[in-house]
Amino acid sequence: MATSRPDKRLLRLLPVERWPSSEEARASRWFSPVALGPVLAHERTWIPAMVPWRATDDGFVSERVIEWYRRFAEGRPGVIVVEATGIRDVPSGPLLRAGHDRFVPGLRRLADAVREASAGRTRLFLQIIDFLSIKRRPPRDVFLSRFATIDEALRSRLPADLASLDSSAVRAHLGTLDDEALRSVLSPRDHESLTMGHRERVTDVHLPHVRDLPATLPPLFSAAARRARDAGFDGVELHYAHAYTMASFLSRRNDRADGYGASREGRMRLPLEVLAAVRAEVGRDFAVGCRFLGDEVIEGGSRIDDAIAFGLAFARAGMDFLSVSKGGRFEDARAPKVGEAAYPYTGPSGHECMPTVHIDAPGPFGRNVSLARDIRRALRAEGLDTPVVTAGGFATFEQAEAALVAQDADVVAVARQALADPDFFEKIRRGHGEEIRRCFFTNYCEALDQSHKEVTCQRWDRDFSDGDAAALAPRSLDGKRRLTAPAWTPPSD
Ligand SMILES: Cc1cc2nc3c(=O)[nH]c(=O)nc-3n(C[C@H](O)[C@H](O)[C@H](O)COP(=O)(O)O)c2cc1C
Ligand code: SF4
C-alpha cells in the first residue's frame, strides 16, 4: 500500500497555539480602525503591493488584473495597495501604467471591483513607481565587440604593445582574455554591464535624462497620482523603496553633486519635492503615503539612522502613512544568465525583503519589525502621529497583534500569506483561523515574478478539489496553474 510522506514544509510553519474566536478578533487592535490622513481604514489589516504580471502588454488593466484584486478584496482587508504602477507612458511589458489619461478607465474598473467585492470595506491605494532602464545580460562576444568602452583609461591597463592598436584590434584582443584578465582590463562599470547587464543609475548625470530627473519626476508622479484619484482610488503610495529610482536617490550610495545627493538633505530633496508636487495636485482629501527602506542592507547603503531621518522629514512634510520595507536592491543581486535581466531580490538584500524559511536566525517571521519600531518611536518622540506600516513574514494573528500591542507599528501588512489565502483576514474575522491555507514562505511566487510569469501560489496549484468550479477556473498562459485562489465557503457561523 502506498504511504504518503509527511510534507516537511508544514513543520516550518510558524506554530499557532490557537486562532482567535470571532469576538477576540473583532476586539483586537489589528481589526480596529486607523486614520491614514484623510482616509479612515476600517482595520489595520493591509495587503502591500504585489506585482502579478497580469496587465496587458501595453500596460492596461486586464480582466485578470481585476480578478486578482477582486479575490483579495473578498477577504476585506483594511487596505489593498495595488502593484507598482509606472508613472511614465513608455512600454514596460505587462506591468500596470498610469502615465496617460487613457489608463484611467481601466483603473476605475479595478477600483469599482474592489469596492464591490469588499462591500466598501477595503480602502484602495495605487503604488506609483519610476524605474530606470536595465538591459539583459549580453553575450560576451557581443558586449566586447560592440559595447565595451575603449578609451584611454582602458588602453592604460593594456600591455604597451597593444595600447596603441585601433579600437577593433583592441576589441579582438579583449575577446581572447579569460574572465580574470578581462576583469582587470575593463572598467568596473563595464565589467558589471558584461556580467549583470547594463543598468542606469541615478548618479549617471552625464546622461541628460538622468541629470534632469529632479525636473521630470515631480510632474510625472503628480499626474499619475491625479489619475489614481480620478479613477476612484483612496490614495497613492509613492514607491520610494527597493531597487527603483526614488530609493536610489535616498541611498547613501547616491553621491550626486547637484544638490540631489551626498548629504541626507540632498538625498531626500527629490522625494520631498515629489511629495509636494503630488500634494499640490491631489489636495488634502486624498491619502498620500510612501514605502521606503528601513535598511538598504547593501554595503555602503542607508541604514536605520538614515531611515529615521527620512521618516521624520516625510512625516513633517505631510505624508499620510509610512510603509517600511527592507533591502531588495540591485547592487548585491545574483548575476543573471546571458539573455536575462538582473532581479533585485536574488542577493542578501533581496532575501531580507521577502525572507524565506531558509534565511538565517531569527528566521523570516516578523523579521523586519524593528525597523518600523525604531522609525515609529522617533516620530512619536517628536510629536508626529503618522501611522507606520510594517511588513515581512507576518503569518499569524498573534504575531501581528503582538506587534501592534507593543506599539512597534500601527498597521501590519501581509503579502505572501494573503496570496496563499486571500480569505486569510475573513477567516480570522469569522473565527475560522484553523481553515487558513498557510504560506510555506519558500517563494515559489517570487520565482514566477522573477521570470515575469503570472504570479500564483504553489498552495493553489494542486488544490482542484472544488469540482467543476476548479476545472473551469482560469489558467495561466502555460495552462498549468490556476490563476486565482480556490473559493472558500464559510461554515455556517
Ligand atoms: C510576487 C511579489 C510581488 C511583489 N511586488 C511588490 C511591489 O510591486 N511593490 C512592493 O513595494 N513590494 C512588492 N513585493 C514585496 C511585498 O509587498 C512584501 O513587502 C514582501 O513580500 C514581504 O512581505 P510578506 O513576508 O508578507 O510576503 C512583492 C512581493 C511578492 C511576493
Ligand atoms: S507560493 Fe504561496 S506558499 Fe509559497 S511563498 Fe508564495 S504565497 Fe507562500
Image (cartoon, rainbow, N blue to C red):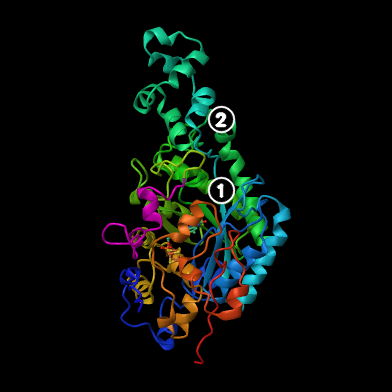
Residue, disc 2: 207
Quadrant of the displayed image that contains ligand 2? bottom left
Q: Main secondary structure of the magenta part?
A: loop
Residue, disc 1: 274
Q: Tell me whether the residue at label 2 lies in contact with that at label 1, contact meaning CB atoms closer than 8 angstroms.
A: no
Q: Secondary structure at mark 1?
A: helix
Front residue of 243/346: it is: 346
* Residue 247 higher or lower than 362, as above or below: above
Q: Secondary structure at mark 2?
A: loop
Q: Which residues are magenta?
A: 343-371
Q: Is residue 330 left or right of residue 284?
A: left
Lower sequence index among marks 2 and 1: 2
Which image quarter: residue 294? bottom left
Front residue of 30/477: it is: 477
198 drawn magenta:
no
Q: Residue furthest bottom?
A: 492
* Residue 90 higher or lower than 70, as above or below: above
* Residue 299 higher or lower than 118, as above or below: above
**Image spot of residue 436 (x, y percent):** 43, 78
Front residue of 178/203: it is: 178
* Residue 385 in sight here: no
**Image spot of residue 107 (x, y percent):** 67, 61
Near mark 2 (Cα within 10 A), the count class, few <14, some 14-19 or many ≥20, is few
Q: Amino acid at mark 1?
A: Val
Near mark 1 (Cα within 10 A), the count class, few <14, some 14-19 or many ≥20, is many
Q: Amino acid at mark 2?
A: Leu
CB of mark 2 near ligand 1 (< 8 Å): no
360 drawn magenta:
yes
